[in-house]
Image (spheres, coloured by chain):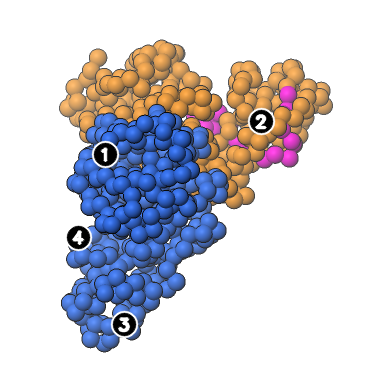
Chain colours: A orange, B blue
Amino acid sequence: MTRDAKTDNDNKGSDMHVLVTGAAGFLGQRLVRRLAEGSELSGKPLSRLTLIDQVEAEGPVDATFESVSRALDIASPGALDEVLDERPDVIFHLAAVVSSAAEADLDLGMTVNFDATRALLEGCRFRKLLETRLIMASSVAVYGGELPDVLDDMTGLTPQSSYGTQKAMSELLINDYSRRGLIDGRVLRLPTIVIRPGRPNAAASSFASSILREPLNGEEAICPVPTDLALFVMSPRKVVEALLHGAEVPGDAFGASRSLMLPGITVSVAGMLEVLREYGGDEALARVRHEPDARIAAIVASWPGRFENLRASRLGFEGDRDFHEIVEAFLDERG
Amino acid sequence: MTRDAKTDNDNKGSDMHVLVTGAAGFLGQRLVRRLAEGSELSGKPLSRLTLIDQVEAEGPVDATFESVSRALDIASPGALDEVLDERPDVIFHLAAVVSSAAEADLDLGMTVNFDATRALLEGCRFRKLLETRLIMASSVAVYGGELPDVLDDMTGLTPQSSYGTQKAMSELLINDYSRRGLIDGRVLRLPTIVIRPGRPNAAASSFASSILREPLNGEEAICPVPTDLALFVMSPRKVVEALLHGAEVPGDAFGASRSLMLPGITVSVAGMLEVLREYGGDEALARVRHEPDARIAAIVASWPGRFENLRASRLGFEGDRDFHEIVEAFLDERG
């Protein structure tokens, strides 16, 4: 299955081999479907898609290119050797242990969120994949502590969770490897993704999708936070487009930092509920029960709600126009 | 030589065991002498001082406490086991590979500046040294890129060197371990230290000490930068006092971040030369030859020159009053 590196280099410019880590996850699966639909990246046709995750990720249906799915643990030594030997042109690095798990188990979080990222970078360095574009998904969780009301591109990272710490450390490493010319890295910090599909879960942000999704599906939802709380959100559709754009922007355009916050939009919970009423009527709004939960409210209130991210806009990253567009996208996809 | 951990805990509050890494270096040696002079820390008498470095560090003369010097490589696995088994109350972590060496050898820098810091933290975690105060020396090199004219406590870290990257990553880790209560960590970012003793060296900052030290000693010095360049500086004496203060401030007082920039003072090269003239006369000033070096000027100009570091002041860290005080301290010590 290993291709010859020389042949690969000769083909440079004519085709595109894309590797996705965390490909079985919610974002990974959406990205895979989107890649299959577009069949190209940076104007070059996709020739091959390699999906890796702990379980075998579902590949695209009706794709015009070869797709291989591998179940492996990226945190185990040498796990990435074979896929990196195939010299991917673009790597979407989405694999991560989520916030609550990283907080519960420091070693697990360090191993998956940081050490595996470092191993990925070292694997690329060892194989001299100097032009491979590595796009890592980071998170709003890199911010925390005593924050200004409106954050901007220069706001410092003082994460208040191990997950945020591990992502911030990985960001620094990707920046240094990129500065040294060892890889062409990019880091995109994701806003809270709304509206996620599925069911409510234990994540503190679960309500943000739930208070729209459930009422629009005729079910009840619980709102645990005050309605004046501001959230910084982005639709799954726009996040996936931003990941693709992150692979297409020239590395030099990023300037002195390869990390940026994606252009989410700021919306209050009250504003979200008003849009719910517009699309679902008073009956949908009535399905939201307000049951304050101080623990969840405190966590969510610690996330920054407002950003002035000029660099992302300057680099052509696009967010949702408004919250209506987010709800319409959800209804559109739900069918 | 290993002491019984239980006995140590029983003695908690009555004596103080201090460990210094990088103890043979310029700052380490000054810190050791200062500890011997004061013989106490946080109001408790020093009972033991452990010095580690690659070479055997010189211990204090006439100290009232036991002092042990060990030559070891902190980057080798298990190197710190024995000294951590002795359960130090305070650790000054000064050991590091300098900027130019970390830039020349990525692996060496990662191993010493980051992995050894992580091993130190893990060693403390494994031994449950929850109350041990760990003070790491960080650097102005964690800043870089597109900076505002005046930096403050919220300015983001976008290092433009591997040294700065490794220090910034270590800072994040110390913050997370402290937040989790695994250690009581503190990070002090050092300004450019002026006036260093010794001879000019290859460091880009070498001139900042040299243009004072050499003329005051009747020798010639070269100034490679424009005189309107602003530097953020601190005397060796104040840096050592700040390290001690860093060990004495209660951890809670740091708030959401254990990292801070020390209160250096901003001075232009012209201002430094004016003070040189005041103390050494026109003949001293005439010993400074202006030979512009674009490479050095570019590196030094990339360092931030102005800070508004309110947190450091609020926490009681003190800088030099003015540049006169810095020169007087040098003359005083030179005798």
Name the element at disc 4. loop
Q: Which residue is mark 1?
A: B74
Q: Is residue B154 visible?
A: yes
Q: Nearer the viewer, residue A280 or B4?
A: B4
Which chain is mark 1 on? B
Residue A330 in magenta stretch: no
Name the element at disc 2. helix
- Residue B209: give x, y in percent of width and height: 27, 68
Residue A228 in magenta stretch: yes
Q: Which residue is mark 3?
A: B279
Q: Which residue is mark 2?
A: A296
**Residue at figure coordinates x 39%, y 58% from the top left:** B38
On screen, B231 above or below A273?
A: below
On screen, B331 above or below A191?
A: below
Kind of residue indicated by mark 4: Ala
On screen, B213 above or below B130?
A: below
Name the element at disc 3. helix
Query: Dot 3: within a 10 Å radius of its alpha carbon, few (fewer than 14), some, or many (20 or more) residues?
Result: some
Kind of residue indicated by mark 3: Tyr
Mark 4 against mark 1, which lies toward the viewer?
Answer: 1
Q: Nearer the viewer, residue B200 or B242?
A: B242
Kind of residue indicated by mark 2: Ile
Q: CA distance from mark 1 to mark 2?
A: 42 Å
